[in-house]
């Protein structure tokens, strides 16, 4: 048996050549063949089965007695011989491929199928009667009729199991991967294994999850913009946090400069009653003033009822300042970051884009970019928020209410609906 790869139209076809005669091991010049019809059974090559599409070609003039034994000689002789397509005679049985021939002469039959090409010129297939060694192998991820291939790996190489490479069924998340169809989880996302001397097939295992919901907490302006790089007022910041409240009841606190008929009055007074925000010593709140980064971080820490931090490395955040503990705590929680020069800028005004970044980290919210790209016509979009903006995903998460599923608190949101 001789086997090699041949790439045609970007696909790699595997060829397995079989002579149907018997060789006298004591007399290399003698062959025995059948002059009557016979049925031939060939075992399935490695990584093929009854679902694989095969072709069977008979090279009628490629006679063994001509001394054709090497792959290069076979390739050259193929062009000069008559090829008979016997694919219609193939029967794929449980034990192998069966076909009938009138007699077994000295010309070979080639079994052809599409396989994976390795860097060494072959794939991970072999068949009875010969051997074939591959240099590289693949991990194939399966879900129903879908397959994603990852590679190339050499035997012994460490392989990290991928996350979800398919669209999750509604109401389900990926639990892990199984080595068998409809099997239990053998590998979770991020697990590793050593590549064996063959390709590996992994099958998606899904589990049911409850659908959760995120409400939108920002809105745009009447002209269709959202102002990602604009500063945000204290009233706007209070409104964002008010939109995130699950319990909007409780005592309210009034300020002298927050009239009850203003659009932000309920939000400001409710949050003040809950201790999330505070005003100034003169009893004012200054709703129209831009909010600083230090003020906003303090408001966020109060909203989350988070403990203040004890250590902060920003050189422009002195330990004796009123906002030190809030900034230290938000930094330790991973909610905020500074500027490239290492500073935090506590007295700088915070932008609307920066606000959504802090809140989303605090609330463990993150946009499902794949879902959004497929449902852009259903989303609330803004003329001044381009896909290339650094906070595009963060602001779209904040502006669009949605239902989602999540495998656990450390995994990403998988959006299932928009509201």
Image (tube, grey):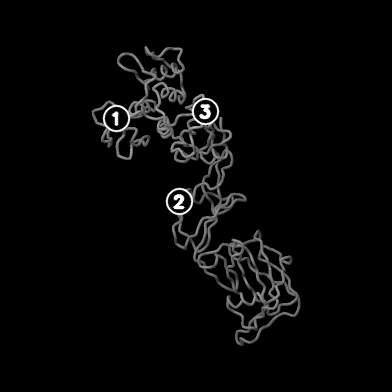
Q: Residue 342, image x and y in percent?
A: 30, 39
Against 24, is 343 above or below?
above
Viewer-nearest residue: 212 or 240: 240
CA gap, disc 1 and disc 3: 38 Å
Tag shown at residue 224: 3
Q: The C terminus lies in which quarter of the figure?
A: top right
Against 140, is 131 above or below?
below
Q: Residue 295, image x and y in percent?
A: 34, 26
Tag nearer the camera, 2 or 1 = 1
Q: Earlier in the sequence, mark 2 or mark 3?
A: 2
Tag shown at residue 191: 2
Q: Which residue is mark 1?
A: 325
Q: Residues within 10 Å of mark 1 (few under 14, many from 20)?
A: many
Residue pictured at 63% horizontal, 87% vertical: 29
Q: Earlier in the sequence, mark 1 or mark 3?
A: 3
Q: Classify residue 262 by image quadrant.
A: top left
Q: Earlier in the sequence, mark 2 or mark 1?
A: 2
Q: Are marks 2 and 1 in contact (CB under 8 Å)?
A: no
CA gap, disc 2 and disc 3: 46 Å
Q: Residue 136, image x and y in percent?
A: 50, 63
- For mark 1, give the secondary structure: helix
Q: Are marks 2 and 3 in contact (CB under 8 Å)?
A: no
Q: Residues within 10 Å of mark 2 (few under 14, many from 20)?
A: few
Is 61 left or right of 242, judged from the image as shown? Answer: right
- For mark 2, give the secondary structure: loop
Q: Classify residue 94 by image quadrant.
A: bottom right
Q: Residues within 10 Å of mark 3 (few under 14, many from 20)?
A: some
Viewer-nearest residue: 161 or 294: 294
Is 241 left or right of 343, judged from the image as shown? Answer: right
Q: Classify residue 333 by image quadrant.
A: top left
Q: Residue 353, image x and y in percent?
A: 42, 32
């Amino acid at each position: 048996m001789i086997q090699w790869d041949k790439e045609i139209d970007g696909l790699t076809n595997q060829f397995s050549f079989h002579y149907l005669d018997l060789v006298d091991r004591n007399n290399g010049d003698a062959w025995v063949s059948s002059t009557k019809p016979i049925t031939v059974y060939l075992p399935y090559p490695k990584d093929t089965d009854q679902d694989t599409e095969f072709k069977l070609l008979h090279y009628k003039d490629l006679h063994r007695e001509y001394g054709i034994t090497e792959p290069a000689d076979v390739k050259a002789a193929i062009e000069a011989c008559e090829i008979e397509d016997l694919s219609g005679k193939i029967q794929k049985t449980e034990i192998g491929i069966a076909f009938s021939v009138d007699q077994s002469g000295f010309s070979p039959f080639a079994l052809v199928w599409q396989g994976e090409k390795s860097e060494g010129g072959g794939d991970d297939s072999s068949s009875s009667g010969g051997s074939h060694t591959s240099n590289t192998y693949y991990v194939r991820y399966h879900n129903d009729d879908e397959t994603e291939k990852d590679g190339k790996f050499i035997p012994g190489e460490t392989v990290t199991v991928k996350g979800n490479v398919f669209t999750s069924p509604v109401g389900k998340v990926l639990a892990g991967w199984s080595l068998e169809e409809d099997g239990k989880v053998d590998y979770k996302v991020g697990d590793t294994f050593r590549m064996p001397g063959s390709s590996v097939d992994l099958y998606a295992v899904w589990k049911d999850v409850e659908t959760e919901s995120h409400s939108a907490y920002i809105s745009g302006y009447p002209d269709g913009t959202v102002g990602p790089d604009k500063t945000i007022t204290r009233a706007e910041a209070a409104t964002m946090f008010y939109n995130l409240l699950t319990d909007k009841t409780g005592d309210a606190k009034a300020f002298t400069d927050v009239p009850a008929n203003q659009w932000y009055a309920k939000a400001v007074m409710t949050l003040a009653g809950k201790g999330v925000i505070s005003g100034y010593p003169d009893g004012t709140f200054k709703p129209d003033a831009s909010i600083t980064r230090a003020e906003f971080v303090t408001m966020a820490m109060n909203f989350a009822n988070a403990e203040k931090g004890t250590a902060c490395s920003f050189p422009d955040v002195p330990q004796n300042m009123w906002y030190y503990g809030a900034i230290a705590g938000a930094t330790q929680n991973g909610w905020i970051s500074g500027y490239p020069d290492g500073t935090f800028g506590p007295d700088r005004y915070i932008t609307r884009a920066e606000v959504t970044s802090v809140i989303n980290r605090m609330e463990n919210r993150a946009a499902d970019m794949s879902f959004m790209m497929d449902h852009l016509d259903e989303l609330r979009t803004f003329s001044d928020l381009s896909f290339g903006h650094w906070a595009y995903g963060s602001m779209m998460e904040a502006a669009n209410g949605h239902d989602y599923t999540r495998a656990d608190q450390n995994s990403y949101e998988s959006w299932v609906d928009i509201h």
